[in-house]
Image (cartoon, rainbow, N blue to C red):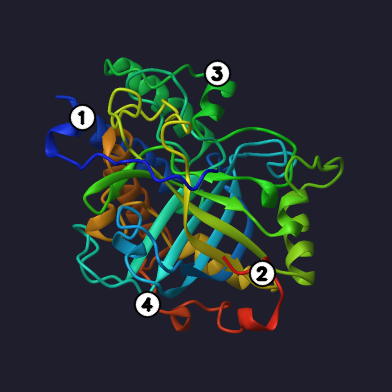
Amino acid sequence: MSRLLPVPLRFAPWFEQPEPDEADTARRIAAALAGHAEGDAPLRRLHARTHGLLRGELQVLENLAEPLAQGLFAEPATYETVVRLSSHAAEGDDGATAPRGMAVKVLGVSGERLPGSENDLTQDFVLVNAPAASAGGEHPLPAGLDAADGGRTTAASTWGLAAMMRAGGAVMGAVGGGVLASALGTAGAGHVLGETFYSQAPLLYGPYIAKIAIAPVSPELIALTGTRLSVAGRPDALREEVVAFFREQGGEWDVLVQLCTDLATMPIEDASVRWPEEASPYLRVARLRIPAQEAWSPQRAETVDAGLSFSPWHGLAAHRPLGRVMRLRRETYAAVAAARARRIGRALAEPRSFDDLPGFAHVAPVSQWVGAPAP
């Protein structure tokens, strides 16, 4: 990934082109997903399998060029983070051959907020292991639609959602599992810790427009890229691998930004288009560090999978999500989170520090372990 700095476009409101029926589409999707979230279906589908629940820190790099020094990344700083690793899987081998997701919640973030998160101090990034969504039509299924929300969506709602959208005149993509999965990430039997994760859809980056990616950088993680796992007879294969890794060592990832330089080749409204890296490469803006720890426990699962919601709409106004996929996510994610809160009988609240997160309070500081060289 090159360090050459492209000349980014400045965002203008007319860059976004909402569909006339978009608000109605969002309401129908939200109602369908919320209904299933409140049901009693025991089988989860979209990124329902949790493989790691991790405490880490995000270090914003020093001396970033002006186009890169925006929003969360405007000043050198270190933030606490919660990271959820997941798979789009309903049954069988724990998602070892299914698309993967990474949701990152950055704590202690101050600044002008997005509507609905005015009293919060978090910035969420919701990512999957594919750089672009399925090219299924004008309304690609929101990538990792439920990866970010603790895995609350059932198989029935997945297929029902696609059918509903077609009936409403908006194409959500073929209902076949392969096409659906391509909107959620890339299937494979590789190790989840060796994957690179992408936002797929863009967001504001201060006055500019960008996509976000998180890529492994420490040697121990890079060594896992493309590594195939033996999953036979291991219903929790990926979780076992993640837990075993972090019991022995930590890992580091680069946080990367791809700036939009040309709306013709880098559209905002179509998340199925992969922005050309030869025109605008991904550039480093931060380092995500996760120290050795117990990567999963029933207490952490209760804290995060039940009690937290991840959404790209939790965050700073400087990183407002852009495009139809992101706009659909706003109402649907909120509806699913509200339905889950009703189901578990308590409100979902954004944490202000790890003191608000049972099971995450005690992890050795990053200074006590050796990871990749300093950025």
Query: Quarter-wise, where is residue 195 in the image?
Result: top right
Nearer the viewer's eye, disc 2 or disc 4? 4
* Mark 2 element type: loop
Query: Quarter-wise, where is residue 31 in the image?
Result: top left
Classify mark 1: residues with Cα within 10 Å, few (<14), some (14-19) or many (20+). some
Q: Say what amino acid the circle numbered 3 marks.
A: Gly
Q: Position of residue 216 (x, y in %)?
A: 63, 53
Tell me the distance, in whole angstroms, between the alpha carbons under discs 3 and 2: 34 Å
| Residue labelled with disc 1 | 22
Instruction: Return the residue nearer the eye: 301 or 76.
Output: 76
Tell me the distance, in whole angstroms, between the alpha carbons under discs 4 and 1: 33 Å
| Residue labelled with disc 2 | 297
Inspect this view and state whether residue 363 appears.
Answer: no
Which numbered marker is on residue 352? 4
Badge 4 vs badge 3, beta-carbon distance below 8 Å? no
* Mark 3 element type: loop
Q: Say what amino acid the circle numbered 4 marks.
A: Arg
* Mark 4 element type: loop
**275 shown above or below 367:** above
| Residue labelled with disc 3 | 176
Looking at the image, residue 124 sits to the left or right of residue 364; the answer is left
Instruction: Return the residue nearer the eye: 199 or 70.
Output: 70
Looking at the image, residue 325 sits to the left or right of residue 188; the answer is left
Q: Residue at x 26, y 50 (%)?
A: 320
Badge 3 vs badge 2, beta-carbon distance below 8 Å? no
